[in-house]
């Protein structure tokens, strides 16, 4: 029978590590923690768990840390988790996968509502079940590299989506790493998008918008990654108050993204911001805002689009309609949409069932 290891990189975070380990231990043969600098208190906690702790060296190269943990495990299959994650559903099916041919297993990762990464991917598929020999690449946003079949598993990984001390570099280091990488690979659209993401998360919307826009020039209109760049730029131009640039982007990209609830949602945001800043145009703009957010509900959720934010095709659009009707003094309609938003908000425990 193939051996399956739970593999984690950690630095302190003893409570989170214990939760993650206990969620997975009934389904794995071994747990390996690569520790890159925990204090004595955390190490004492780890010693009380049925795990093998391996001393590691922290590096700004995230892939190097991941690969050191995989090397330490030396198992036929590896299940990769971060400390703030735990197995929520579907773990009983792991053995049927690890007893089969080599393939990479995708798991659904659910992030808690209101978390620090909520604007990225509140729920997404991630390659976490890896056969022996698969290794990671990428100093900042590491990804496994492989030439193997991919299968979607029934495994659901839940995440607190908290910004802990963690084993990763902090955002200032992230930015430095990305800038160094861009010096070697100038114009790389993936690196530009990642740098824009960092700036957006720290509220530097004007700079972020420019990096998103530059990234777009390096990818074809048919590239899946382009959606994340377009909606990132539109959101950041609007939040930065660069409404003329946002309108220009809307005119340029609108035809390509009529199927996107995220793009449509952000159009509503743009029109609403214009309505608030230019009251004389309120009567003209209000119907455009209303149409955009209602259209989001018709489109529904599209988690398959890169950079999609859960809720823009459901409860977030309903919440915005509530605000719009309050501003317009249509209080009865506002209350109706508040109630609808409440019923549309999907508990994290139900997301997996909806995804199938």
Image (tube, helix red, strand yellow):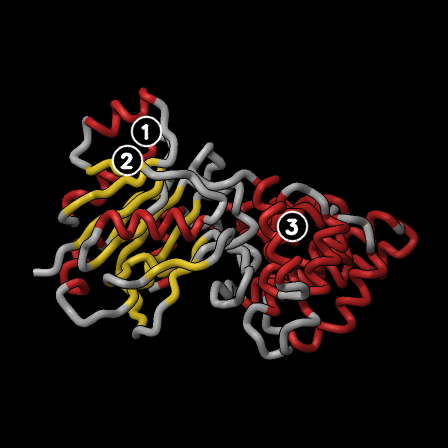
Q: Is residue 147 visible?
A: yes
Q: Quadrant of the C terminus?
A: bottom left
Give the residue displayed 70% in from the left and 71% down from the top.
217
Point out which mark residue 19 bears.
2
Above or below 167: residue 135: below
Q: Is residue 290 visible?
A: no
- Residue position for label 3: 320
- Residue position for label 1: 15
* Nearer the observer, 335 or 313: 313
* Nearer the observer, 256 or 286: 256
For marks 1 and 3 on the same chain, the one whose residue lies earlier in the sequence: 1
Contact (Cβ within 8 Å) of mark 2 with mark 1: yes
Give the residue displayed 26% in from the left and 60% down from the top.
154
Give the residue displayed 38% in from the left and 61% down from the top.
144
Image coordinates of residue 333 in percent, x first then y, are 65, 50
* Foreground label between 2 and 3: 2
Q: In terms of secondary structure, where does tag 2 sit? A: helix
Image coordinates of residue 335 in percent, x first then y, are 61, 44
């Amino acid at each position: 029978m193939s051996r399956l290891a739970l593999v984690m990189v950690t630095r302190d975070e003893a409570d989170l590590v214990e939760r993650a380990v206990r969620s997975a231990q009934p389904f794995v043969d071994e747990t390996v923690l690569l520790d890159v600098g925990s204090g004595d208190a955390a190490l004492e906690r780890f010693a009380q768990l049925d795990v093998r702790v391996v001393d590691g060296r922290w590096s700004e190269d995230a892939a190097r840390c991941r690969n050191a943990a995989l090397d330490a495990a030396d198992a036929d299959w590896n299940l990769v988790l971060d400390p703030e994650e735990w197995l929520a559903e579907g773990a009983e099916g792991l053995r049927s996968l690890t007893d089969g041919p080599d393939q990479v297993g995708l798991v659904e990762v659910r992030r808690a509502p209101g978390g620090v990464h909520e604007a990225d991917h509140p729920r997404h598929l991630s390659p976490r079940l890896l056969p022996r020999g698969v290794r990671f690449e990428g100093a900042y946003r590491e990804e496994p590299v492989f030439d193997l079949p991919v299968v979607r598993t029934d495994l659901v990984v839940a995440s607190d989506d908290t910004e802990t001390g963690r084993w990763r570099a902090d955002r200032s280091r992230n930015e430095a790493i990305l800038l160094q990488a861009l010096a070697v690979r100038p114009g790389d659209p993936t690196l530009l998008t990642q740098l824009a993401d960092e700036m957006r998360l720290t509220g530097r919307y004007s700079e972020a918008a420019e990096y998103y826009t530059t990234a777009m020039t390096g990818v074809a209109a048919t590239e899946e990654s382009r959606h994340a760049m377009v909606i990132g730029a539109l959101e950041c131009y609007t939040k930065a108050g660069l409404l003329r640039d946002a309108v220009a982007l809307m005119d340029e990209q609108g035809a390509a993204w009529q199927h996107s609830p995220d793009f449509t949602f952000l159009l509503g945001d743009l029109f609403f911001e214009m309505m608030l800043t230019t009251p004389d145009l309120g009567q003209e703009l209000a119907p455009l805002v209303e149409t955009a957010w209602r259209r989001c509900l018709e489109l529904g959720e599209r988690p398959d689009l890169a950079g999609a934010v859960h809720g823009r095709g459901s409860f977030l659009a309903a919440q915005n309609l509530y605000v719009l009707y309050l501003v317009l003094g249509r209080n009865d309609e506002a209350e109706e949409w508040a109630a609808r938003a409440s019923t549309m908000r999907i508990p994290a425990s139900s997301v997996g069932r909806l995804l199938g």
